[in-house]
Image: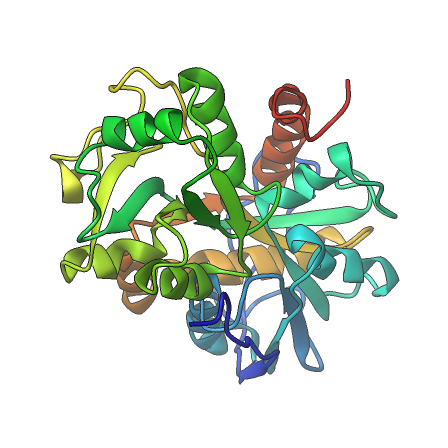
Amino acid sequence: MSKSFAVRRRQFSILAGAAAVAAPLAAPMVAPMAAWGQARWKPDKPITIYNPFAAGGVTDVHMRLLGEAVTKILGQQIIIDIKPGAAGTLAPAMLLNAKPDGQTLAVMSINTLRYPHYQQTSWNPLTDFTYITGLSGYTMGIVVRFDSPWKTFQDMIDAGKKDPDKFNYGTSGIGGTGQLMMIEIEQATGAKFTHVPYKGGAEWMQALMGGEIQFIADAAQWAPFVDDGKCRILAFATEQRIPRYKDIPTMTELGVKVVGQSPYGLLGPKGMPPEIVDSIYQAFKQASTEPKVTEYLAKFIQVPWDKNPAEFRAFAEKYYVDVKPLLIKAGLAKS
């Protein structure tokens, strides 16, 4: 079985209808939303959203479902354009040449706030984009195939100590949350494993089921496989246990204080007018409450991550500073 399978770029056209109200981007709170149909801004042509996540993956489907709900709000076609590459930062980088008119947006992975610390970029994540809204976040964990000889998280650690670098694990890319999580685990326990990066969850699930890797250290695209009995969870990288899998411990409970943080949201080009920003924010905020959206996210242990423009920017500014010591500790960035 090949290590990866072809993921073709594709575009999804989704209609969208009318809404929202404006509030200054810099304000600590967003002003109350006006009645639907009284939006200060409506797009007059299709909106393109660049998506760095692999086609067919959880985030890709999430964006299409949001687009279907936004159909009732903004009244224009939305094109989801898959733009993988540069550790998930190609999509936001494409905003540098876009007009700040609300017609071109991008999904921002958390790696957008990490990448500039260890790789030279032509953009600054805090000054070159407009922060619009948070969308959701991933639940991170360690997962093995159902027939793995490892029954516990400690079994995995013991194997990584006995045979350093013998066992492979898959993640969604270099410098991503999964790899950082594993680097912290290795440093805390002395175990060593070999990292195999993939373009997305569909690829690393195929690699796991095909025996190319021994475990996954990444987001819960594996959840349906666990529910079907094809995989087992060894531990979660969360602050608390997950009610749906209440018998599975967190790594912190097991003495390894690792919590994976991996939210994603929506960006626009630098300098977008506040009324456009808020109209888009309000549209996605409403769309995120649609049952088909929340039900889909629940399958993968995700929930909507509602952040207004000011809150999203504040999160980015804090995380950008806080993550650098971890990247230095991991050997990815220099002090």
Name the quadrant containing residue 86: bottom right
Observer able to see residue 1: yes
Q: Which percent across, then down, holds residue 130?
A: 73, 49
Instruction: Locate the N terminus by quadrant.
Output: bottom left
Question: Relative to 57, does residue 171 appear above or below in the rendering?
Answer: above
Observer able to see residue 262: no
At horizontal 78% and vertical 56% (from top left) the residue drawn is: 93
In the image, 256 versus 112, the foreground residue is 256
Instruction: Locate the C terminus by quadrant.
Output: top right
Q: Which percent across, then down, holds residue 134?
A: 52, 47
In the image, taking residue 333 as reference, residue 305 lies left or right, namely left
In the image, 219 versus 188, the foreground residue is 188
In the image, taking residue 79 as reference, residue 141 lies left or right, namely left
In the image, 34 versus 49, the foreground residue is 49
At horizontal 88% and vertical 48% (from top left) the residue drawn is: 122
Q: Which percent across, then down, holds residue 318?
A: 63, 25
Q: Which percent across, then down, holds residue 99?
A: 84, 65
Residue most toward the front?
Answer: 163
Question: Relative to 232, does residue 181 appear above or below in the rendering?
Answer: above
In the image, taking residue 226 as reference, residue 301 lies left or right, namely right
Question: Relative to 225, does residue 8 appear above or below in the rendering?
Answer: below
Colour convention: rainbow
In the image, taking residue 85 as reference, residue 334 lies left or right, namely right
At horizontal 61% and vertical 45% (from top left) the residue drawn is: 174
In the image, 167 versus 99, the foreground residue is 167
Q: How many marks?
A: 0
